[in-house]
Image: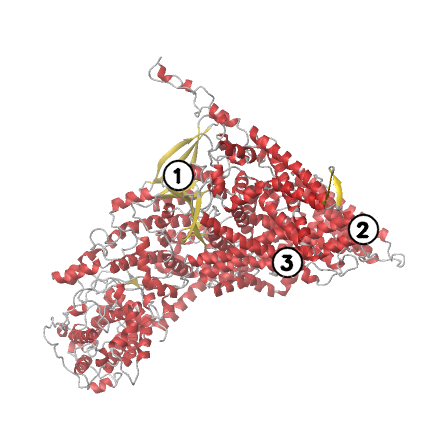
Amino acid sequence: MKSNADHINKRNYDDFNEFFWSRDCLQYRYSCEDPNDRADSVENNNMAAPLPGEMQQPITVGMLNAPKTFLEKRSWLRGIMALSRVIEWHIVTFYLLAVVAFSHDLVWGWVVTLEVASGVFWIFNSLSIIWALLEVWASYPGIHLAGTSIFGSVFVLVARFLILVYQTLYLMWTYGPAKGSYLGIEADSTFWWWQYVWLSLLCMVPYFVEAMTNLVPSITTKLFTSRNDYIQTFLNILFPISRLYTAKEMHESFKHTAVYVFFWATLIAWKLYFSYVFEVYSMVLPTIELTDDFANYPEQSFIKMSLLLVLRWLPQFIVYCIDMSIWYSVWQAFAGTSVGFSDHLGDIRSMKDIRNSFGRAPEHFCSKMLSPDAGSRRGSSASILNLGASESSLDNRRQPLSNPNLGKEGQSLLGNDPHKLQGYVNRLLDVRIQKWVMFSTVWNEVIDHFRTEDLISNKERDYLKFSRFNGFSQAIYLPVFQTAGVVEEALDLLEGQLDDDYQPSDNELFKPILNHVTMRTAIAEVWELGSHVLLKLLGPVHNDDAVFIINYVMKWAENGTMSDHMKIAKIRSIINDLVGLVSVLKGVSRRKPALQRRSTGQKKSVAAPSGPPARGIRRSISAGALNAGNVAQTPMAPTQKKVENVVIVDALRDQTRDKCRALLNSLKGIMNASNREGKEVMDRLTFALSMENGFFWDDAYASDALDDLSRSDIFKSVLTKLQGLVACHPDEVEPKSKEARRRLTFFVNSLFMDMPNAPSIHDMFSWNVLTPYYKETVTLSKGELESRSDALGVSTMLYLQTLFKADWANFLERMGLQDEEKVWSKKIAAETRQWASIRAQTLNRTVSGMMYFEKALRLLANMERLDDDTTNDLMGEKFGYIVSCQVYGQMKKDQDSKADDIDELMHRYPHLRIAYIDSARLNRTGEMAFYSCLVKSDGNGGIQEIYRVRLPGNPILGEGKPENQNHAMIFSRGEFVQTIDMNQEGYFEEALKMRNALQEFAKRDGPMPTTILGLREHIFTGSVSSLANYMALQETSFVTLGQRVLTKPLCIRLHYGHPDVFDKLFFITRGGISKSSKGINLSEDIFAGYNNAIRGGQVAFKEYLQVGKGRDVGMSQIYQFEAKLSQGAGEQSLSRDVYRLCHRLDFSRLLSYYFGGIGHYFSNVLTVITIYVVVYLMAILALYDLEKIGDRLITPMGTIQMLLGGLGLLHTIPLFSTLGVERGWWASLKELIQVFATGGPLHFMFHIQTKANYMTQTILVGGAKYRPTGRGFVTQHTPMDELYRFFASSHLYLGVEMGAGLVIMGIYSEAKQYFGRTWSLWLASLSFIASPFWFNPLTFDWNMVTSDYLKWISWMRGHAGGASRSWSMWWSEETSFYSKMPLTSKGWFIIKAILYLTIAEGIASSDLARADTTLNNPFVGVSFVVASIVILFILWWLLSMVEHLMPYPVRRTIGILIGIGLMVSISTVFIEDSNFIRYGLAAYYGIGGMCQVGLLFGSKFVKNFYFIHDLVCGHIIFIPLFVLAVLQIPHHIQTWLLYHNALSSDVVVSNILRYARKSQESGGTTAPNEDLVEQIAELRKLVQKQEQMIENLGSGNVSATSGMMKQNPSTDAIASLIKAPSQDKMNIQSQPGSYNVMGGSMASRTMSASNLDVWGEMALGDSAVSHGGYESAQSYQTTTVPRTSDFEFSSPSAMPPR
C-alpha cells in the first residue's frame, strides 16, 4: 500500500476489504499466532491441542495473495464509464433536438421526422456496445470474474452486435431506393423501417425497465434484495453489479422521489428549449449550406466538408454538455430559497428583529431547548432562581449570575407573614416567570461568553444582559437593548391620543401601551427604578414626603383616575428632567467619597416616623415662585454652626440639586391643582423643595447623600439600568461588533426554527468530537506574534490588532490595561497569546470552541438541578473530545513547544483527551513496536496515560489525515462521532442546541435510517481581504444553500469535510468514517459519504446549529486548496465508489450527484476545452478563409460568446439567493456589486482553469497528494518570480496562448463584430494572466516592480540552488511528468502539437506582411544579416561556456555587445524584408509544435526554446506592470479594492502597508527600522493620552466656582479632567436585607395606569396583594455593600443630546 506504483499495480484498503467478500477467505484462520506455540500449565492433555481449523494458514497469508477487485485505471475512460448514463442522455437528446431543428427548416412531414428520429435506437445500441467494451477494458487484466459474469458479458456483446448489424442494414434499406430487393424480399422502405423498429424495441427492453425503476426506485431495491433464484440468476448474468454486497438498498420514499423528479423534469424541459433555440437551431443553416455546396459543386471534398461540420458542431455540443450546470445553479437557487424560507431562515436579520421577537423567545427556548426536568416542572419550584450557586462551576473566574444568598430573598422581603410568603411562592410557580428566569440565565451566560471572547465591551455586555435586583418587585429586568427608546415611543403614543376637544379615560389613553408587552414592561421599570433613585437620592429627611407622593400616584393608577389628577400632556417634561438628572448622576461612579461625614448627623436622626412627616423649617419662598421655575437663583443656605462654617465646593452636588429641583417642579407642573389630592401632592412637593435641613438647602447633607450613593453598587447599577431606559437610543445600546450581532441574530432566529425537543441530560444521546492534528500551530507564541518575517515587516500581532481593533480594545479593558506595552507582562502574557490564537486558525481556537459543549451541558444540567457529582459523571458519559495528535509523542521527545501548548490545553480542559501514535525500538535490528495511546491531564500539572494499545505495525500506511482519525476511533465512547477539522471553531450559544441536534437521529424521514447529520458552517475568514471574501462567499453558498438543496429536495447530500455527526455504530461496522488508501482517497471525507450512500444510510442537514470554519485567505493558499480538491475529484472519478454509486442511483439522483458534486469539476474541464476549441476554431477558420460558406455572408458565432460569458453570470444566482435569504435582498445585491467591482470575475474564472488543469493532470498523469494549504495570515507581497513559478504552467502559458490566438484571429478575420465575438474569450485570457498580480499587494508600486523584475531576471539566468533560484531546474521539475505519461495520455498533447503546426502553416501561406523583394533592393542583404544572427548566437553559446574564466568587466562588455548585435540584426531583418514577420510568427508556432512532441519523448534540446518562450511571456506581463506603476494611480486603486472588505469593517489595512513601506524605506525590505518602531510606539501612546483627555473634557461636569471657595478634590467633578475616569464596575445586585422600596404598597405587583398588571404575560411582577393604603416607609441609612460581579453595568462616558 505504501508503494509509489499506480493504483492498478498495488492493492488498497478496499481490495483487502473485498477479499473477505469471497469464499477464498474461508481457507485461512483469523489469527496470526501459531497454535503450536501455545503453552499450557497442564502438560500432556488435549486441552492445548489445536481446535478444528486452527491448522490452516493465517489470514495474513491470504491477504498477501489477495487479488485486486477493481482496476483504477488512470484514464478519462474511467470517468466516462461511471457517468455513462449522463453522457448517453446528452448525446441522445442532442440528436433528437437536431432532428427537430432540421425538420423545421427542411419542412419534413411527421413521417420523415419520425423515421429520422428513430435513429436514436441505433445510437442507444451503439453506446451500449461501447459501454460493454469499456467494461472489458476496465476488467482486463487482473480482475477475476465469475463464470456467470463472463457469460453474461459475452452474451450481451454478441447479441447487441448482431442487432446493431441488422439495425444498420435496415436503416440503409429504409433510405435506399423506394423499391428494392434485399435478403430475397422485395419491399418498400416503410417495410424495412418497421423491421428496424421491431428489432430495436427488442434491445430497448432494458431501457424501458430502467426507466420504470428510475421513476419508482424502490422496484430496484426489491429486485436486488429478492430471494427468488430466477431473479437473482437473471441479475447475475446481465447486471454483475448486483453480485456485490453493497448498493442493495439506495431508494428514497415515493414522496421524496416525486419532488426531485419534478425538480429535474422542469429543469430538463427548460434546458432542452433553451439549447434548441441557441445551440442547435443556429447550426442548421450553416450545415445545410455546407452540404448543399458539396452536393452541387463537384470540386468539393467530402473530407473537408465533414471536417468543417465537426469543427462547427463540436463547440456547440460541448456547450450543450456544460449549460445544464448553469441552469442547475438557477434551479438550485430557487429551491434553496424556498426551503430556506420554509425553515424560517433569515426571519431575524438584525438587532431590531431580535427586539421585535424577544418577547416570544423564552417560550420557544423553554419548549425546545430545555427538557421537562428543567426548572420547576419536577420537584420544588423554589430553586428556580437559585441557579447561581451551581453555575459557579461553569467558570471559576466569573461570579454566578444570581446571588448565592438568594434563598434568603423570601425572608428578607416577606418577613414572617404567611400570606406574603404564599404569594411569593405563587409567583415562583408561575410558569411564565420560570421561562423568563431560565431564559435570562442562559442569555446572560451567552453574553458573558461574548465578553470573555472580547467581542463586546463591558458597557455593551451590561446593555445586553438581563438585570436582577434582590428585594425589588420583579424577578428579572429586561436587557437595556430591549427597552431602550421604548419610553419615548410610549410618550409619542400618549401625545398622539390627546385632543383638546375630547379627554379620553385612562383605559382608552393607556390601552395601546398596555397591549404592547415591552412598552408596558419598560414603563413599569421606569416607575420602580426611578422611584428607587429618588428615594435614595433625597435620603431619610424627605422619605415620608416621597412615599406619600408615590402612594398617591399608585392609588390613582389602580383606580384609573390618573388623567383626572394629572396633566398627561406634560409627562414628557418629567421624562426629560429625569434624563437630565440621570445624566448628572453618572458622575457618582467617578466620585471619591469623603473620609468622614460633613453633617453633624443630628438632622438625620429621624427614626421611622409613624405619623405625619416632621415639618422642618420652611424657606420663605412661595410655591408659586418655585413653580415659576426660579430655581437657578438659589438663596444662600442659612448660617451654619461654627464647626461647619466652611463652604463645601461640590460641583456634582450643585448640578444634581438643579436637575432634581427641575424634576420636582415638573412634577408639580403636571398636577391638577383643582383636585384636592393633586393639591395635597403639590404641597408635599413644595415642602420638600423648601426644607432647610433637606437635600436642596443643606450642603453637608446633600454631599453626604451623594457620597453614600457613590459607595452603593446597587444604586449605580439601578442608575445605569434607568439611564438605558430613558436616555438611550436603540442604536446606542446595540453591540458594535458585526460578529456579535451575527451570532446573536442567528441564535435567536434558531429558536423559531424547527428543531427536535431536548431530552433530559440523562436521556440524551452521547457523542464524541474527533479532530485530527499534525504539526499546525497550537497557540501562537510571543515570538511568532512579534516576528516580522515577511517582506513588509508586519508582525502577526500588529496585523491582528489592526484587523480586530475593537476586540483588542475590549481585551485591554477586560485586562484593566491602559498601556499596551504591559500585555507581555507575566500575568497577562498567557491571556494575550490566547486572545491572538483564537483569532487565527490554530488548534487552540478549535479546542476552545469545542469545549463549549461541556460548558453548555453543565449549564443545562444545572438548570435540571443535578448535583455536581452527577453532573461530572454525566459529562464523561455524554461528551468527550479527542484530538488525534499523530506526532505528539515525537514532539515530547523533541521537546517541541507545541507539545507544551497541547499539555496546557489538557490542563485547562480536564475532559480533553489526546490520542497519538507512539513507537518504541524492540531490538538492535531496528524492529519497532507501535502503539495507539490516549492521555489526559492528571489534575496536578502532569499528564496521565489512560490507554496504550499495541498495534501490529505502523498504522500510517495511506493518507495521513484519515489514518490519524482511524487510529483514534477506538477511544471514542459515544454513540455518535462528530468530525471537526483544525480550522473550525465552536460557539457557546450553538453548543446549547447540540442535544436537540442529536435527536435528529431518532427521526426517520424515509425508508433508510439517518446515519449522517450535516450541520451548517459559517466562514469566519471573509473580512481579511477581497480574496478571503470571495472564498468565504463561495464556501458560504456551497455549505448552506448547496447542502440545503442536495438534502432537500434532491436527497443526495454526502459528506464534504464539514462538521458532520456520524452514527458511529453504523460506520464502524461498514468501513469506518475515513477511507485512507494512498492517492485514490485523497479527498477522504467524500468517501465517507459514498460509503454511506451505497450501504443504505441517509443524510440529514440542519441549519439551526452552526459551526465556524476558516478558509484560505491568500492567492497561493486558495490555489493550493482548489488544486487539492480538483486532484481529489480526479482520483474519485477513477474509484470504485463513484462507479458503483453512479450505476446504482436512479437517473434523477444521478443528475443531482453529477451537477451537485463531481460534475462541477468535469464542467470546468469542458469549459476550458470549449474556450480553447473556440479560440483555435475561429483562428483556423480566419487563417484558411473558411469563415464564410461559399460566397454567402459571414455568420458570426455570437451565440457561443453569449453562452460562455453572459450565462456565466447566472452562476452568481445561488450566492445571491444565499445572502438574500439570510441578509436581505438589497444587502445581497450590494455584496454582489462589490464582488464584481473588486475583480471577483477574474478570481472565479482564474480558478476554473485551476480546477480544470489539476483534474486533467491527475487523470492523465497522477501525482495527486495532500496539500497542506496553511492557516496563516497573508499580508506580504509575493515576488513575481515566485508567482511565475507557481502559475506559469497552469495559467500564464494558456493565457498568453489564447491572447495570441485571438490576435491572429483578429488580423485575419473578415467578419465584423470582433469585440462582440471575442469579449468573453479576452476576459478569460486576461483573468489567467492578470489575476495572480492583481491580487498581490503592492503589485503596482514602482519600487516593487523594479525589484521583482530584477529578481525574475536573476531567476531566469540562475543555474543552481533549486527551483526557487534557477529557471533551468524549475523547468526540469515542472516538465518531468511528460515523458512518463502513457501513450494514450500523450495523444492529447500530440493533438495540441498538430494544432500548432496547422496554425503555422496557415500563417506561412497567408498574405500577412507579404512584400515583393524583387522590387525592393535591400540596403543590407538579408542573407548576410541572417548569417550574422547565426554567428552571434554561436558567440553567445561560446561565451556561456567560458564566462567563468573571464573577468567580470570583460564578460559584461562582451555580453552587452552580443546582445546589441542580436537586437540590431533581428530588427534589420524585419525592416529589410517584412516577409520575415510572417515567417517568424509561423516559425514560433511551428517550433512550438515540434517542441511539444520533443517534450513528450524526452528531448533535452527543446529546453532552449522554452527558455525563449518564458522570456517572451515574462515580458508580456512586465511591460504593462511598468506602465501602470509609472501612472501610480493603479497602485492606490488596487490597495483599496484588495482590502475593501476589511476597510468596510473599520479596519485600515492600508496603515499596515504604509507602516511596512516606511520600514522598508528606513531600514530595508526585510525588517523595520527599530527607531521607527519606537517612534510609532511613542506616538501611539501620545495619541491615546490625547484621546483620553478629549474624552474626559467631553464627559466631565465642570462647574465654575469662586476662587475664594475651598476646593474639595475628593468630591469635585473637575478632578475628572486631571484623573482618568475610574474603571470601577457597577453592580445591579443588592444584598439580602435591603429595604422595601415603596413600603407595603410598592412591594405589591407593579401596576399600570389602568390597574392592570404591567408585565401581563411576561409575568415579572409580584403577586402579593396590594392593600391600597398609604404606608410610610421606614427610614434607612445607606451602607457600603460588598461588590459582586453578578450583573455589571459601566456608565457611558458621554450621552448624545436628546
1457 vs 1249, left or right, is: right
Mark 3 belongs to which amino acid? Val
Q: Which residue lies under the disc numbered 3?
A: 277
Q: Residue at x 37, y 63 (%)?
A: 354
Mark 2 belongs to which amino acid? Gln
1251 vs 164, left or right, is: left
Q: Quadrant of the image for the C terminus?
A: bottom left
Q: Residue at x 11, y 76 (%)?
A: 612
The residue lying toward the viewer, choosing from 758 and 292, is 292
The residue lying toward the viewer, choosing from 1570 and 301, is 301
Q: Quadrant of residue 643?
A: bottom left
Which tag, 1 or 2, sits closer to the chain's start? 2
Question: Could you say which disc has been placed on residue 1065 in the image?
Answer: 1
610 vs 812, left or right, is: left
Total marks in image: 3
Q: Quadrant of residue 685?
A: bottom left
Q: Which residue lies under the disc numbered 2?
A: 300
Which tag, 2 or 3, sits closer to the chain's start? 3
Separation of disc 3 and disc 1 at Cα? 53 Å
Q: Are marks 1 and 2 in contact (CB under 8 Å)?
A: no
Look at the picture and state if 790 lies above or below 928. Answer: below
Q: Residue furthest front?
A: 186
Give the image location of residue 1142, x and y in percent: 54, 42
Q: Is residue 1470 visible?
A: yes
